[in-house]
Amino acid sequence: MAEFIPDYLNIDYNTYVAKLQQELQQSDIFRDYDYEGSNISIILELMAYFGDINTYFINKIAKNVYMETADIYECVNRLARQVGYEPKGVRGSKGTLTVTVTGCTPGDILSVEPWKMLNSGRETLDGEAIKFATTAQQSVTCSGSSVTFGLPIRQGEVQNLTDYKGTDLIENELLLPTDYAYDDDLDDSLPSVQLTVNDVTIWNRIEDFYEDLITEGIDDVYMFVYDRYRRTKVLFNSTRNVPQPDDTIDLIVLESLGEDGNISADTADDTWDIEDTLFIYNQTTLSWVNNSLITLSLSGATVGGAAPETITEIKNNSQSALKAQFRNVTKNDYNSHLSSRSDVIRATAWGEQDIAPSGSIQNYNVVRISLIPQVWGNSTISTSASIITTDWGPSGTTIVPVAYSSAWEAELSEYLRDRKMISTYELFIVPVLVYFSFEFTLRIKRTYTFADVQADILNKLEYYFRPENQQFNSIMNFNDVLEYLLDTTIASDTDDFENINGIRNLNLRDINADRNIYEPNTIGNYPYYTTTDLDVQRDNNLRPIQIGLSEFPYLSKDTVQITQET
């Protein structure tokens, strides 16, 4: 269905010209006037032109008054903030380095200083170095002649913005020169910004000026926002403390590469370089550790790097936040709250009423949660490999989620803590990926080549199964898949699938899944799923099927077969 667009003045250029002529023809002077090619027609057309432009802008303004129809970033950002949602700017990825320090004495206390630069040795496609920083202090005690520990890091180059004055504030706002790294989780141990007033007091960054109002001694607060003009600003509020005109304001920020700053685990060829000579301080000997005694390695991928939120993301996240009212009660509440993080694509939650309406009391008050991370790996959910084979021949390698990273699970639990219901607790369930593969037959139009049409079908099918476009516990209707592939109006953010127009006839001959899919128990008794499963190999395999609560649909692209009909 096409999106409804308000149309308050349905008058175009030609209608304006006709109406002006009708008005003039009602007068005695211009009643019998020949307008075609006359001088007065130029004036009429000019007036119609201005009227047409006026109609366009009135409709544009009306369209962008409401979140549902707004399509200008400035308006969407402003509307989201009116309902209490802060749109997010560019976010730097984060991970954990393994640090080994040799040559220390048992009992020595080593301190890694914040805001120190590290070069990963990797580059973006444009040849830009991918650098990381320590953003919080961490201490460790040597238990022998060496010590190994995990060091949290965040992607970005450290920038020191110094010597701002209170007089630089305009209506309690400080506009920064460019877009710096936002942070979508202010409760973790990796801040992306530090603000100091008068070189002494480090102020606290908060999400809302009305939080913690009753707590004594935390009025030195600020907000770090991404405004409607895509600029980074620091906000103060007169209900809390505001730097005085003579106060000095210093900031340490990260200039991040966003999604281009996500990197994989180290290989044998990767080496890290410490860019700061003074990196680790020995608090026992009161001396700096020589960098030659420090080795760094990354065992898991960094995650969470993302570009600023798009218009669609802001719309979805702001509306979900408004409905949730800062409490996670329903599946949609958990999905929207967790999916607003840059390291989570999709989330779901379910409870006792979903799996055992009359079952064991051990299921009471348990909120089960499954997630699809932005990047699979030891930093989020570790995986193993598996093989899927189809009846018609092709086979391909798939990934199988194994276990959550304990650090990531703890971080997510802390992230959810303030919004969870009283007397409930979360239990993280490893998601189950259900891989689907398809067998198609294709007949093309004469002006197209089979290879081009085949490639676009594969690309569009892959786009359909992108995690951003799928949900947990969804109903897989294969008629919907066919309709989606044949719809020539659908385009991705990078591809318009132009060669889909070359399909003359497309038939779905067979489907395959890498696991048996259990039928839901429609009676409502425990257990949720019956012991009889749906045999995906049987003939009646094109009817809609619903996957499980923790199951998520994926595409095995290597096992999709498209053959040409003659």
Image: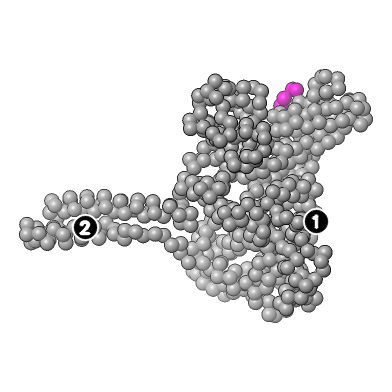
* Nearer the observer, 485 or 162: 162
Q: Could you say which quadrant of the image residue 232 lies in?
A: top right
* Nearer the observer, 461 or 53: 53
Query: Residue at the spot x=16%, y=54% of the render?
Result: 41
- Please tell me whether mark 1 sits on a helix, a strand or a loop: strand
Magenta residues span 274-278
- Please tell me whether mark 2 sits on a helix, a strand or a loop: helix
Residue 303: horizontal and vertical position, in percent?
Answer: 70, 45
Which residue is identified by label 2?
17
Left or right of 535 on screen, residue 33: left
Query: Residue at the spot x=78%, y=29% of the render?
Result: 112
Query: Residue at the spot x=72%, y=63% of the render?
Result: 350
Tell me which amino acid carries mark 1: Val
Left or right of 553 on screen, residue 23: left
* Local crowd size for mark 1, using a 10 Å CA cut-off: few (<14), some (14–19), many (≥20): some
Residue 144: horizontal and vertical position, in percent?
Answer: 93, 30
Q: Where 442 falls versus 276 (above or below)?
A: below
* Nearer the observer, 33 or 112: 112
Q: Is residue 158 visible?
A: no
Residue 60: horizontal and vertical position, in percent?
Answer: 38, 52
Tell me which amino acid carries mark 2: Val
Q: Can residue 217 be seen in this view?
A: yes
Which residue is identified by label 1?
402
Residue 277 drawn in magenta: yes
Residue 353: horizontal and vertical position, in percent?
Answer: 73, 68
Q: What label sits on residue 370 in the rendered view?
A: none
